[in-house]
Amino acid sequence: MTTARSRSGGKALATRSRILDAAAHEFRRTGYTGTRLSDIAATANTQAGSLYYHFSSREELVEAVLRVGQERTETYVFDRLAAIPPDAPRMLVLREAIAAHLTSVLKTGDYTAATIRILSQVPEEIRERQIAAQRRYGEFWRDLFAAALASGELRADLDLSATRMLLVGALNSSADWYPSRSRALPLDRLIAHFYSVFLEGIATPEGRGHRVHRRVTTPTPPAPPVAPSSAASARGAATTARILDAAATVFRTRGYAGTRLVDVATEADMQTGSLYYHFGSREDLVAALLAVAWQRTDDIVRRSVAELPADAYPIDRLSTVIAAHLLSALALGDYTSALIQITDQVPDEVRSRSAPLQRAYATLWRNLLADGVAAGEIRADLDVRIVHRMIIGALNWTIEWYHRDGRLTPERLAEQTVSAVFEGITWR
């Protein structure tokens, strides 16, 4: 018999779940510092008093969002793997884990994307607890890779820790771009693309046979595009660069909605009035930041390709682009992170100012992939639009986990990434 108490409890649980879903959506959309509880209550279609009944503060609510998102993914993955026989090939288990993690990420997209957006913005004690939970889940993935390696099913010449993080980064970033606005692959085809790129590699046997990766060194980020004609304008350009550097740091830690120009001025160690001399509004500043972030990466990558011999194979050009993008993402640090975190949070009019740069850069990648297919060096059964997004997601995610004092130099990480993408991680 259903009692009044059980009905009331069920309603409370449903309300709590609705609040969490709304909070994940709002944190994804406006960041942690820019989200108010009243915004979440409105999205959840509930009264603020009802929200406070379930969560006494924004801190309690954001920690619940982070925890629930993590638990949902883990539960989905663990339940799916529990159905696999214990004596199944370890590669089969790894493939199932990839499929389950990706499916869960897409089912709980707001939670995954919110975690990416706000983890650097939440109070330190909350961030530390979430990182500890992520680390425990990471140990599960380490065990999967170690078991497959021990069974002889994975290559032993790759750093499997870095390879694992590249794979997880690509999986998690899919919450931001799948489904694409149009012509999205069905989920089963998307899963197959992940298998192809990270387990089997995208190169044909011919491509593997003659690809010679060109070593790309860590780039020096070019200055913002300013051509000073005097000492005064040179000082102005230097000040502009300092403001943009400060803005990248602040937007990374506070999000778009939570950042004020006074915060950027403080980070840049200057008066707010002086900042207004260079940028008339927050919108102008963030538009310039996005444009510079895209332009710097584009310049670094195109310069690296231009240095190749004219008769370089398409697959060699693509390998150079992958390495150059990875190294530029690490070199540009705060700019890369700010680009990832705030692009979808800024007004459409602001985002549209850098859209031509973004499209031009995407076109460069897709043309190189298409050239590789036409030359018979890249597999023709892959959707180059999807491959491009998957690789970019993996590369950009490195800023969240790579440490320069670790086992791999940035250049060595780039070489390993190129090898994994073209040749896969499975033993042949």
Image: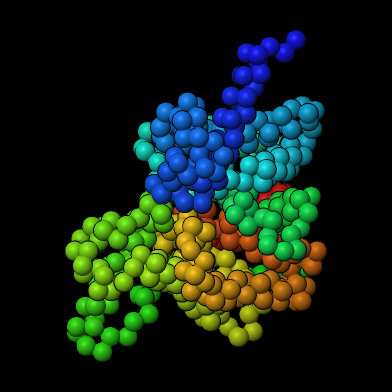
Quarter occupied by residue 105: top right
Q: Is residue 399 left or right of residue 110?
A: left
Quarter occupied by residue 94: top right
Can the viewer see residue 353?
yes
Q: Residue at x 57, y 39 (%)?
A: 45
Q: Residue at x 42, y 36 (%)?
A: 58
Q: Is residue 382 above or below residue 362?
A: above
Query: Where, quadrant-wise, is the N terminus in this rendering?
Result: top right
Can the viewer see residue 138?
no
Q: How many tags in the picture?
A: 0
Q: Is residue 367 above or below residue 325?
A: below
Where residue 335 appears, as percent x and y from the top left, is 41, 62
Where residue 142 appears, as percent x and y from the top left, is 59, 37
- Nearer to me, 356 or 400: 356
- Nearer to me, 343 or 378: 343
Q: Residue at x 71, y 29 (%)?
A: 79
Q: Is residue 259 left or right of residue 417?
A: left
Q: Is residue 395 left or right of residue 422?
A: left
Quarter occupied by residue 321: bottom right
